[in-house]
Image (cartoon, grey):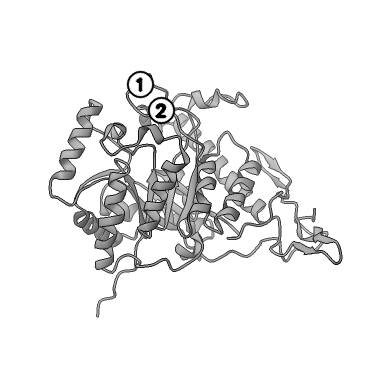
Amino acid sequence: MPQSPAPLHLAVALEGAGWHPAAWREPGARPADLLTARYWADLVAEAERGLLDLVTFEDSLSLQSADPFEPDERTDQVRGRLDAVLIAARIAPLTRHIGLVPTAVVTHTEPFHLSKAVATLDYVSGGRAGLRVKVSGRTDEAAHFGRRAAPPRLRVEDFDSPAGLAVLRELFGEAEDYVEVLRRLWDSWEDDAEIRDVATGRFVDRAKLHYIDFEGSRFSVRGPSITPRPPQGQPVVAALAHRGEPYRLAGRSSDLAFTTPRDAEDARSIVATVREAQAAAGRTADTVHVFADLVVHLDSAPGAAADRAARLDARAGAAYTSDALIFTGTPAELADLLGAWQQAGLTGFRLRPAALPYDLEQITRHLVPELQRRGLFRTAYEAATLRGLLGLPRPANRYAAVAPGAAGTHA
């Protein structure tokens, strides 16, 4: 008897008024609200009504641009954004189940600061925090900080050149070290380090706080954190990957890889590459989810989504292109594609709504019920944490068994 497929995991990526650059001009768009907490709260509430595993919030260190490598001078597209970690923290108390995964650029930020920010998000959300780590090789973003030499200007076609590969190795090697520091800092307090005993006057057991003593070629961090170990132990770490070095980061350091396959065969190859990197890092026993990203124009009426996509392209003055596959069709047709791609080894999907809130509502109110009818998606939230929703165990603390005076010296 054939075995039923495992239920899919489903995420949405929230970006401004939607991923299409003309989405802010749609009748249902809310361009005046993009910098308000209520706008983001409404979107996440809709995603939670659809029982989605998580939402991601986009972020960057430069204004949005039609060119992924440098600024532009356009005034007809959304420009300006709020900080993703702070948005997630503001939304957390308004939600109960859905995972909250902000994006943070790790190239120009400090892991100590980010570790306590994400640990705080895990506390205020009750264990639903994650983080998507993002690298930056842009010269304009390096100029905001002035603490390191600006990288050479590269385009996609330069990535396979010796200079391009060297830049990628440096950026993603640094990101790998960065994630290691985050994880060590989250473990630098043992779970029972806080005593809070009023009778004895002992609030904390200092023997259960640990120096992490990370020494790398890019930075050194002593620790411990100032924030106790997060409720999940380790918030979920995600990475977007398109090619070799990012796949290596995903397999070696992440819990969740967002990828951009073009078809099922490409998805199968990508999954194999991530699994190879995972095995090389000695993580074969760990669960590393591989999701596919898709930009979606959805409408229940046949042809309506294509008409809307054409209207958006006309307003933008050019056909929209993306690093991810652009899907245009009905929720039932998208459910067919997700089911077929699942057979390639993908465990879930991150959908990028082309226009908000319209395409998000098509996902939650039409795609989700279709997947439920096929037995491919949950009918209720079954866990209280993001790790629980993704089937990831709460990891043991790496320092808990370390004796005083041994490696991992007590603070």
**Residue projecting furthest to the left:** 302
**Disc 1 element:** loop
Q: Residue 376 carries which label?
A: none
Above or below 338: residue 360: above
Foreground of the two, 370 or 252: 370
Would you name the residue on which mark 1 appears?
Answer: 75
Q: Residues within 10 Å of mark 2 (few under 14, many from 20)?
A: few
Q: What is the x, y in percent for residue 375?
A: 28, 69
Residue 68, located in which quarter of the rendered image? Answer: top left
Left or right: residue 399 versus residue 360 is right
Mark 1: give few (<14), some (14-19) or many (20+) Cα within 10 Å: few
> Compared to 338, does 372 lie above or below?
below
Disc 1 residue type (three-letter): Thr
Give the residue at mark 2. 79
Residue drawn at (26%, 51%) of the image: 362
Picture coordinates of residue 400 (x, y %)? Answer: 71, 64
Q: What element carries label 2?
A: loop
Q: Say what amino acid the circle numbered 2 marks.
A: Arg
Name the one closer to the observer, 350 or 212.
350
Is residue 130 visible from the viewing direction of this image? Answer: no
Question: Is residue 202 among the parts visible in the rendering?
Answer: yes
- The residue at the point 55 percent across, 36 percent down is 107
> Does the residue at mark 1 contact the one at mark 2 (Cβ under 8 Å)?
yes
User: Left or right: 374 with respect to 220?
Assistant: left
* Of the pair 118 and 340, the residue shown nearer to us: 118
Relative image position of residue 270 (x, y in whole percent):
36, 52
Residue 106 in the image: state x and y as whole percent. 55, 39
